[in-house]
Structure formats: C-alpha cells, structure tokens
C-alpha cells in the first residue's frame, strides 16, 4: 500500500506543478507506442535538456520495477548510455543536495519526500547505463555508511546489475572481506543474491557463469552467518551441481552445524 501511495504522490505532485513543455508521457506509455510513433518522437530525446526534463518529471515518476524497461527505452528512442548517465548524475546531484542522503530528515516537507523517492529511482536507472565513472560513483555510495541504508541498497543493486564478470568478482570479494564486511553487513545476502541473478542473466556466457560460481563458492566457504549461508547456498546449489556435490559445501554444513539434509532441501 505504501508503494502505491508513493507512486500516486509523485505523479500527483508533477501534475499539479504544470509542466507545459515536458515531452511525451510516463515510461510504460512510451514503451507501448508503435514503432512509427516511436520513430516520430525520437528527436525529443536527442536534446539533452529535454531528456533531463522528461527523466526528472515523468521517467523517474514512473517507478522502475524492471531495469530491462530502461534498456528497451534506450534502444527504441536512441538514447545512449553516456547521455543518460550525464542526465542522471546531474539529477542525483540536485536531489541529494536537497535531502542530504537522509531518507526521512527531521521535519521533512513534501518536497523532500518527493526528492527522496526520485533520488532512489535515479539510482535504479543508473544501473542500466553506468560506465566506469558511473560504477565508481555507485560504489562510493555503497561503501559510505553515512548515507541512508535505502540509498546504499539501491546503489549496490545497480552496481551489481551493471558489473562485468571481473567487477562482479572484485565486488563480491570486497563486500565479503573481513575489512569491509562490518560496514556492508546489511548487503551481504543481497550481494549473494545479485551475483546469482547475474549468473541467470549470463545464460550465453559460460565464462562469466564460471567466475560467479567460483567467487560465490569461495565466499560461502568462509561465511559465518548461518542464515545467510543457508539462503545463498540454496540459490547456488540449484544452479551448480558441481558446487552442490562439493566437499567444501559439506564441510561448511559441518562448520556451521547445519544438518546436511536441511541444507539440501
């Protein structure tokens, strides 16, 4: 219910402001247009100012539920990653200046509430266009424990969605290392989950899949949290028979005092 209310509030907020020059419509509306209509409207997004205006006022207000929608938006309207990232970083700079990276600042106004929701949406969109600079920016948010947990949560999600195989390996290793684990503890299970989600996405890339299985297996061999281990182990064993039958998995059951039959359910 809260999610629905947030969406309604954002759309209502922009509607009452009256933006006569804002192009087109919300994201789902655009993706439902015919190819002919799409081609006719592509010029709107060649203008950076128009792209920023639409993204801020309608794109982010659409509430992104599937990053593939942004991929489809870029493809259909000829929006390149560099242009979209520049727009999003500018928007994030503006919104974070209003909120101070606090999700619910004391005495929060309606404007700050809206800014916070749009800031989260901008971080989600960045996961579909971030280059090396954008990923470094996201990693900076993830590792900054002065920022609200919710912003860091969506930053790590976007980073992992955009990461290549080597970046995935480095991120999982870093997040689960002794030095960083305390700071990143809220995201430990999320890290496992996102790594294995990337495994599913790489169905035509056996090398990436091998890297993900190797790094997650190594992390689970050292995992100390029984609940986190059990959940991540279930995900990995369903994807890799080699891991499921491995001696290291059985050793982890013994180390964490988890009955083998429970771990294999």
Image: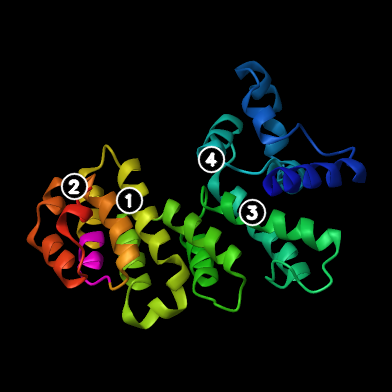
Please give the name of the residue rendered at 14% of the width and 68% of the height, measured from the top-left corner. 254
Instruction: Give yes or no for contact between labels 3 and 2 (Cβ–Cβ under 8 Å).
Output: no
Q: Earlier in the sequence, mark 4 or mark 2?
A: 4
Secondary-structure class at tag 3: helix
Residue stretch rendered in magenta on the structure: 216-223
Nearer the camera: disc 3 or disc 2: 2
Which numbered circle lies on residue 233? Answer: none
Please give the name of the residue rendered at 62% of the width and 70% of the height, measured from the top-left corner. 148
Task: Measure the C-alpha gap from mark 2 to mark 1.
Answer: 11 Å
Which numbered circle lies on residue 240? Answer: 2
Considering the whole magenta stretch, tell me its main secondary structure. helix
Q: Where is residue 210 in the image (x, y as percent from the top left)?
A: 20, 51
Q: Where is residue 164 in the image (x, y as percent from the top left)?
A: 35, 54
Q: Tell me, yes or no, if residue 99 can be seen here.
A: yes
Nearer the camera: disc 3 or disc 4: 4
Instruction: Give yes or no for contact between labels 4 and 1 (Cβ–Cβ under 8 Å).
Output: no
- Location of the N terminus by quadrant is top right
Magenta span includes 178: no
Task: Measure the C-alpha gap from mark 4 to mark 1.
Answer: 17 Å
Q: Which of marks 2 and 1 is nearer the N terminus?
A: 1
Q: Earlier in the sequence, mark 3 or mark 1?
A: 3
Task: Measure the C-alpha gap from mark 3 to mark 1.
Answer: 24 Å
Which residue was labeled with disc 4?
Answer: 66
Q: Which of marks 3 and 4 is nearer the N terminus?
A: 4
Q: Tell me, yes or no, if residue 131 can be seen here.
A: no
Secondary-structure class at tag 4: loop
Which residue was labeled with disc 3?
Answer: 122
Please give the name of the residue rendered at 18% of the width and 60% of the height, measured from the top-left corner. 259
Q: Which of marks 4 and 1 is nearer the N terminus?
A: 4
Task: Measure the C-alpha gap from mark 4 to mark 2.
Answer: 26 Å
Which residue was labeled with disc 1?
Answer: 196
Number of callouts in the render? 4
């Amino acid at each position: 219910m809260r999610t629905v209310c947030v969406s309604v509030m954002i759309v209502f907020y922009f509607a009452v402001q009256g933006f006569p020059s804002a192009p087109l419509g919300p994201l789902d509306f655009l993706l439902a247009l015919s190819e002919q209509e799409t081609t006719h409207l592509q010029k709107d997004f060649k203008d950076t100012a128009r792209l920023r205006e639409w993204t801020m006022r309608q794109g982010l207000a659409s509430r992104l539920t599937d990053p593939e929608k942004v991929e489809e938006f870029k493809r259909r309207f000829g929006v390149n990653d560099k242009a979209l990232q520049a727009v999003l970083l500018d928007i994030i700079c503006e919104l974070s200046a209003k909120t101070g990276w606090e999700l619910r600042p004391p005495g929060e106004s309606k404007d700050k509430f809206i800014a916070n929701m749009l800031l989260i949406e901008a971080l989600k969109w960045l996961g579909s266009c971030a280059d090396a600079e954008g990923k470094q920016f996201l990693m900076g948010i993830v590792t900054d424990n002065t920022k609200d947990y919710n912003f860091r949560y969506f930053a790590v999600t976007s980073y992992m969605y955009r990461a290549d195989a080597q970046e995935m390996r480095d991120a999982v290793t870093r997040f689960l290392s002794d030095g960083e684990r305390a700071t990143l503890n809220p995201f430990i299970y999320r890290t496992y989950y996102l790594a294995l989600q990337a495994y599913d996405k790489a169905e035509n890339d056996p090398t990436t899949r091998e890297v993900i299985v190797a790094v997650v297996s190594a992390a689970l061999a050292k995992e100390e949290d029984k609940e986190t281990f059990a959940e991540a182990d279930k995900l990995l064993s369903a994807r890799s028979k080699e891991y499921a039958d491995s001696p290291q998995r059985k050793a982890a059951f013994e180390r964490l005092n988890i009955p083998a039959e429970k771990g294999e359910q």
